[in-house]
Image: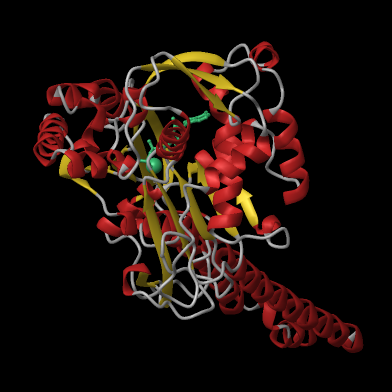
Amino acid sequence: MDEQREVKVQNPWHRPVVIFLAGVITGGIIIMVAISVIQYKPLPQKYKYGIVLDAGSSHTSVFIYEWPAEKENNTGMVRQKHTCNVEGKGISSYSNNPVGAGRSLQKCMEEAKKTIPAHRHHETPVYLGATAGMRLLKMENEDASEKVLESVAHSLKSYPFSYQGARIITGQEEGAFGWITVNYLSKNLRKPTGTLGALDLGGASTQITFVPQQEIESQDNSIDFRLYGNNYHLYTHSFLCYGKDQVLKISMGKKMESTFKADETHPIELKDPCFHPGYNLTKTAGSVFDTPCMEGVKMANGSFFHVGTGNWSQCQQSIRKVFNTSYCPYSRCSFNGIFQPSVDGNFGAFSAFFFVMDFLNLTSDSLDITKQNLSTYCSTPWKKIVQNHPKTKEKYLSEYCFSATYILTLLEDGYKFTSKNWKDIKFIKKIEDSDAGWTLGYMLNLTNMIPAEAPDTPLMPYGGYVAFMLLFSLLILVLLLMVYLYFRRSSRTAQKDII
Ligand SMILES: O=P(O)(O)OP(=O)(O)OP(=O)(O)OC[C@H]1O[C@@H](n2cnc3c(O)ncnc32)[C@H](O)[C@@H]1O
Ligand SMILES: [Ca+2]
């Protein structure tokens, strides 16, 4: 009896106090893990929204963005939730009927009301930015451009959102915010890796923006940002009148100037190598000369037959006349005496750069192959082109040869891309489901969603933290088990020894 009592005393696991302590520790660990997991778990996502209207020269688009409410300062968190294309032409086409400009937005704004939850309406900012079409209207008729802006502002204020303004943005803003958009969506801004240059081609202007290796010699082309703790020194330029619709008008105007004689009776023929053989449409000189971009070109009038001859190299010759490369007040220029450092790094080319090159399937070949394919396409008879694309709008279809030739000429002769760095240009429409364009960058900037300094982030991400806690607790449990087994074995050995 005495010996048995002695064994019981030697085995500590038989003591109620030890059993109690082990239970308390195990329970404590379980509670600790449970609390930390529950405590640290993100609450169900709450989203915030923002609306930006891109009032372009050819049309207006409404973009609705959303982002998780508590993560708005993180790169890549804002995504495009919805887009709506406003019916009809751009707001600058309403110069004779400004009320129509505001009215044209109604359908898409009603859609925005349905897309964004009602309880968020009052705190959702809405911005309208107008680009080159309105810049040109302002040059032609300032009063009309103000009336159009008043009309769209009046329309936007009638919705339950937080109206933040309707204005004509500058070409510099258009270029810089396009650059911010593509780099934000590509998550380039918080990494030390390189950034993506931005190439935007609209109907009435075109923008080039990138981080250059060389010094920027003209102040007008330089813009600085501090984003997430990094400094960016950007080169940007916007060429007003060098969107694809305006360049088509200018190059046709120049052809008319050199071929039409003053005493000729109308209608006459305008032979155009940028249009397919067999293409023949009666047009009015007024539809070509209705732009302030035609300064210095002698105006024709009446109507004419626009006749295609489908010759790519002649087309390129005619387009080259639109670029003035005869003077440069800097160490190097793109064209029209505008400073441009040599292009560097990868570029994202969007809007009409993408529409045109994607339609013609010219997005992935070398520059030489691209030229050959385009040459074949331009010389294809118009009848065959229409047969091959029965669903495409004839206006777009007739202009693809011209547009692609302009794109190649702008990139090669204008911006000085070469067959060597041609592969650095990626023709893109979207990045991660959001459209490439200036609107997202504009909203991120105006809502201060990209901080100058990198925000503090938790030491460990949520997943890593939970995994760490589980592993650590498991380790303690294993240790406890090992101690238990060790004491049990030693107490049994002691028992045997005594027996
Ligand atoms: O930037 P600005 O110059 O103000 O013009 P925009 O914003 O209206 O210009 P877009 O990028 O929307 O369009 C550029 C051009 O591409 C044309 N376009 C749009 N969709 C197209 C498509 O699918 N195929 C061919 N062209 C298209 C459009 O008519 C314009 O001439
Ligand atoms: Ca545009």
Residue 9 at x, y percent in the picture: 69, 86
* Residue that extends furthest to the front in the rendered view of this protein: 263
Left or right of residue 195: residue 260: left
**Residue displayed at 91% across by 88% down:** 497
Left or right of residue 284: residue 18: right
**Splitting the image into 4 quarters, where does residue 105 fall?**
top left
**Residue displayed at 59% across by 26% down:** 275
**Image position of 221 with respect to 287: above or below:** below
Q: Nearer the viewer, residue 468 or 316?
A: 316
Left or right of residue 57: residue 436: right
Residue 433 visible? The answer is no
**Residue displayed at 31% across by 51% down:** 443
**Residue displayed at 48% across by 30% down:** 259
Residue 300 at x, y percent in the picture: 34, 27
Left or right of residue 280: residue 228: left
State which image quarter holds ligand 2.
Answer: top left
Residue 464 at x, y percent in the picture: 59, 66
Residue 33 at x, y percent in the picture: 53, 65
Q: Nearer the viewer, residue 405 or 228?
A: 405
**Image position of 451 with respect to 53: above or below:** below
Image quarter in which the N terminus is found: bottom right
